[in-house]
Image (tube, rainbow, N blue to C red):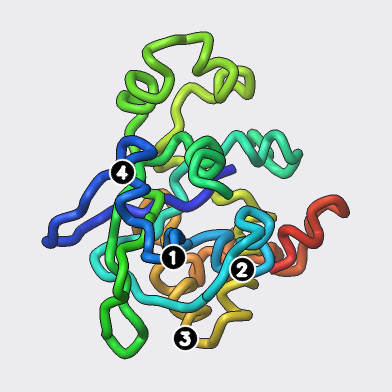
Amino acid sequence: MSSSDVRSSSTYEITELHAEADFEKLLSPDGRISICGFGSLLSERSARSSFPELTDFRVARLNGFQRVFAHVAPIFFERGIAKPETKIPAFLERELEFRFLAVLPETLDGKPFDNPSVICARYSDEKFFRIRCKGNKDVYFQLYGRYGIDKIWRDDILPCRAYLRHCALAAKNLSDEAYNNFLDHTFLGDRTTTIRQYLATTGSGIMEEEPPESLKTRYGG
């Protein structure tokens, strides 16, 4: 029922991006922007479905952040996989409930990248309603309320099973290091239980579950 959120515990300064003009400042000399993906974007195939002109897909390390499944995502309801029990503007619309940060990832050898990347990070329900919904209850209803969601960011939900499987497979396809990092450094909403622990206990069987036929390609890792 949730997707991943990233919470910063970093001591270095992080720049928040508020408008399209802020993103444009991050463009490389050839007019491209770097996106730092930590969930479904770990899959190159999935990333290309969002960014058809994607180039230079690569693995990076981002320090000072924690990956947590604590976000109710309406797109899972739209795709029929949630259970209640590329262009910059398109990207902004797709990830509306997140806040956007400019961060500087590094290679696995510890070398910082030349240009900052954009990452989606945890927002707050209050700011989402006040800023993104302009304080309009009708806007919130269209985005979330019609699915019975009254709170977006929470600690009492479990990951959408098809989405978690997809992210885990995507990490595994990248490398053993990426896969182990995902399992051991990604947490449930309680921020205590790792994904490895979850898959070995109450989440057992998730990796054997096939997504709906319509999503087998997109959510196949």
Residue drawn where x is 34% and y is 40% of the image: 21
Mark 1 closeness class: few <14, some 14–19, many ≥20 residues within 10 Å: few
Q: Is residue 35 visible?
A: no
CA gap between label 1 and label 2 equals 24 Å
Q: Mark 2 = which residue? A: 43
Element marked by disc 1: loop
Q: Where in the figure is residue 6, as x and y percent of width and height?
A: 36, 54
Q: Mark 1 = which residue? A: 30
Q: Which of the two marks, 4 or 2, is nearer to us in this view?
A: 4
Q: Earlier in the sequence, mark 4 or mark 3?
A: 4
Q: Is residue 71 left or right of residue 112?
A: right
Q: Where in the figure is residue 25, as x and y percent of width and height?
A: 30, 51
Q: Is residue 52 above or below residue 89?
A: below
Q: Which of the two marks, 1 or 4, is nearer to us in this view?
A: 1
Do callouts 1 and 4 mark residues in contact (Cβ within 8 Å)?
Answer: no
Q: Is residue 81 visible?
A: yes
Q: Where in the figure is residue 65, as x and y percent of width and height?
A: 29, 62
Q: Amino acid at mark 2?
A: Ser
Residue 175: quadrant of the picture: bottom right
Q: Mark 4 = which residue? A: 22
Q: Is residue 142 above or below residue 165?
A: above
Q: Is residue 97 above or below residue 67?
A: above
Do callouts 4 and 2 mark residues in contact (Cβ within 8 Å)?
Answer: no
Q: Earlier in the sequence, mark 3 or mark 2?
A: 2
Q: Is residue 168 left or right of residue 119?
A: right
Residue drawn where x is 46% and y is 61% of the image: 32
Q: Amino acid at mark 4?
A: Asp
Between 182 and 198, the one nearer to me in the picture: 182
Q: Which of the two marks, 3 or 2, is nearer to us in this view?
A: 2
Q: Amino acid at mark 1?
A: Asp
Which disc, if any, is residue 82? none
Mark 2 closeness class: few <14, some 14–19, many ≥20 residues within 10 Å: many
